[in-house]
Image (cartoon, rainbow, N blue to C red):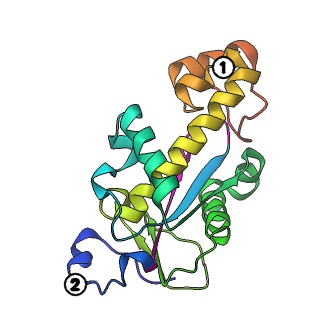
Amino acid sequence: MSGVLREADLLEFDFPPQREICGIDEAGRGPLAGPVCAAAVMLPADFAFGLLDDSKALSPAKRIRAYEAIVSGALDWAVGWATWEEIGRLNILNASLLAMKRAFDALILEPRMVFVDGNKAPSLGCPVFPLIKGDSLLPSIMAASILAKVARDRLMARLDAVEPQYGFARHKGYPTKEHRQAIKKTGLSLWARPGFRVE
């Protein structure tokens, strides 16, 4: 893995062509239930970059519009997961890195350089650069953040259909008041991450 980058470092960074860059990000590090999801994305130079931003900064409608543009217009993209059991066994950081590696390994194309949101990155067998706040700085990471969030949100909505008493479709497994109260009333869900204690 190469050194951690920050925004100021990008001014002098020697980037390869856009088509040779892969961005990776994850969604779901903070929830009490459900898997963590990661996405890897390679974009063409003529992509509609104005659609992109950090997934958390986009409205649901804009996020879906961007998601559809990415899956139809990216050069390559893939999603990887780590289960709630793996999160309990590995811890959330290592499970997130595992999901990132699974997403990267599912790509068909081979990027020349990979940028990962945050300050940690998996070993991928090619140059990898963790980028602080990358999901608001680099288009390929923005796209990955959008894919990961939409994919995970949709999965949590499906889990909500199985156990509607927890409200997963609304809070996506995050530690909201509603979620904590549901756990106190009903007990842990089928997809609770091991080690959680209700306070």
Residue at 53% of width from left, 71% of height from top? 121
Q: Which residue is mark 2?
A: 12
Q: Residue 135's quadrant in the figure?
A: bottom left
Residue at 36% of width from left, 82% of height from top? 17
Q: Earlier in the sequence, mark 2 or mark 1?
A: 2
- Helix, strand, or loop for circle 1? helix
Span of residues in magenta: 20-34
Q: Nearer the viewer, residue 12 or 175?
A: 12
111 lies left or right of 130: right
User: Residue 174 location, x and y as percent?
Assistant: 55, 33
Q: Is residue 109 above or below residue 48?
A: below
User: Residue 105 location, x and y as percent?
Assistant: 67, 71
Q: Nearer the viewer, residue 176 or 157?
A: 157
User: Residue 63 location, x and y as percent?
Assistant: 41, 40
Q: Is residue 25 above or below residue 22?
A: above
**Crowding at label 2, few (<14), some or many (≥20) Cα neighbours within 10 Å?**
few
Q: Nearer the viewer, residue 107 or 23?
A: 107
Q: Nearer the viewer, residue 101 or 106?
A: 106
Q: Is residue 136 above or below residue 28?
A: below
User: Residue 193 location, x and y as percent?
Assistant: 71, 40
Where, quadrant-wise, is the C terminus in this rendering?
top right
Residue 144 makes an appearance in the image: no
Residue 32 counted in the magenta span: yes
53 lies left or right of 107: left
142 lies left or right of 12: right
Q: Which residue is mark 1?
A: 166
Residue at 64% of width from left, 33% of height from top? 156
- Helix, strand, or loop for circle 2? helix
Amino acid residing under circle 1: Tyr
134 lies left or right of 108: left
Q: Residue 164's quadrant in the figure?
A: top right
Residue at 40% of width from left, 69% of height from top? 44
